Amino acid sequence: MSDAGNGSLPLPVFKPEEKVCSNCKLFSPHSVEERRGWVGTCRLHSWRGMFPPSAPICDKFVPKGSAAPLALPVTVRARAVVRGVAPVVVRRRVDPNEEVDLEGLSMTREELMEIFREASGMAESPQLANKWEGGTVRLVPSNPELQPKDLPIDNLFHKVVMVRDRLRVLEQKLNAHPKLSDAEKVEMQSYITRVYGSLTSFNVLFKDKSDQFVGSKGDE
């Protein structure tokens, strides 16, 4: 990867009327990659990571040269200035398979930590398959008089990943529930497996197969 300031590759220029992120004041060029060329970040959607300036605009688009800068949401500004206030913790060796009991909710320590990681977003985020980067999903109404709707693929991918993560947390909580019988857990788990099977159509978006949805044989 080349540094943004070395001028090894000129930043692409798009016409003002072109609907691309490079024409949005929220897009910040960052650096040059060998494979994709220039990439940058969005000040408003930081979760998108690095993406090319040719990516299609979203519904938060702010054209360059507009009268006043768009104020970022309070929650976004607040996150930028938060300082760590966690107490100092003395670490000790623990067995990840050691069982913990939270008011009757029995699970292993590793299962509990996995729930925390999923809920807090600390788990490693799945990657979008390379061929979809900067791509667009177009929704075309049957009525030709209506305008189609363009949605950046990485926006769709982010929502699919959120659904996947919530399902995993639900599955973990269900399996550790103290008041459900084994038969009830099996029945509820079968519904979750069917949901996974219904979502396997989105597996094409994932770069790594290990991150994909896995349903029952009949659902795939």
Image (tube, rainbow, N blue to C red):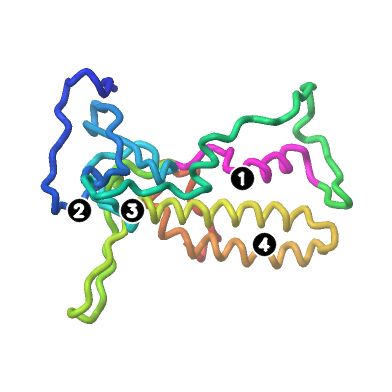
Q: Closer to us: mark 1 or mark 2? A: 2
From the image, tell me which residue sits under label 4.
Answer: 189
The answer to whether mark 3 and mark 4 are in CB contact below 8 A is no
The extreme left residue here reads: 15
Sequence-wise, which precedes: disc 4 or disc 2? Answer: 2
**How far apart are the two marked residues, 1 and 2, measured between alpha carbons?**
35 Å
From the image, tell me which residue sits under label 1.
Answer: 118
**Residue type marked 4:** Gln
Residue 209: give x, y in percent of width and height.
Answer: 45, 44
From the image, tell me which residue sits under label 3.
Answer: 153
Q: Secondary structure at mark 4?
A: helix
Magenta span covers which residues? 107-126
Assess disc 1: are there few (<14), some (14-19) or many (≥20) residues with their C-alpha within 10 Å of its C-alpha: some
**Residue type marked 2:** Lys
Q: Closer to us: mark 4 or mark 2? A: 2
From the image, tell me which residue sits under label 2.
Answer: 19
**How far apart are the two marked residues, 1 and 3, measured between alpha carbons?**
22 Å
Sequence-wise, which precedes: disc 1 or disc 2? Answer: 2
**Screen quadrant of the N terminus:** top left
Left or right for 176, reference 39: right
Q: Closer to us: mark 1 or mark 4? A: 1
**How far apart are the two marked residues, 1 and 4, measured between alpha carbons?**
19 Å
Residue 183: give x, y in percent of width and height.
Answer: 78, 66
Residue drawn 63% across and 41% down?
117
Residue drawn 69% across and 66% down?
188
**Quadrant of res 53:** top left
Sequence-wise, which precedes: disc 1 or disc 3? Answer: 1
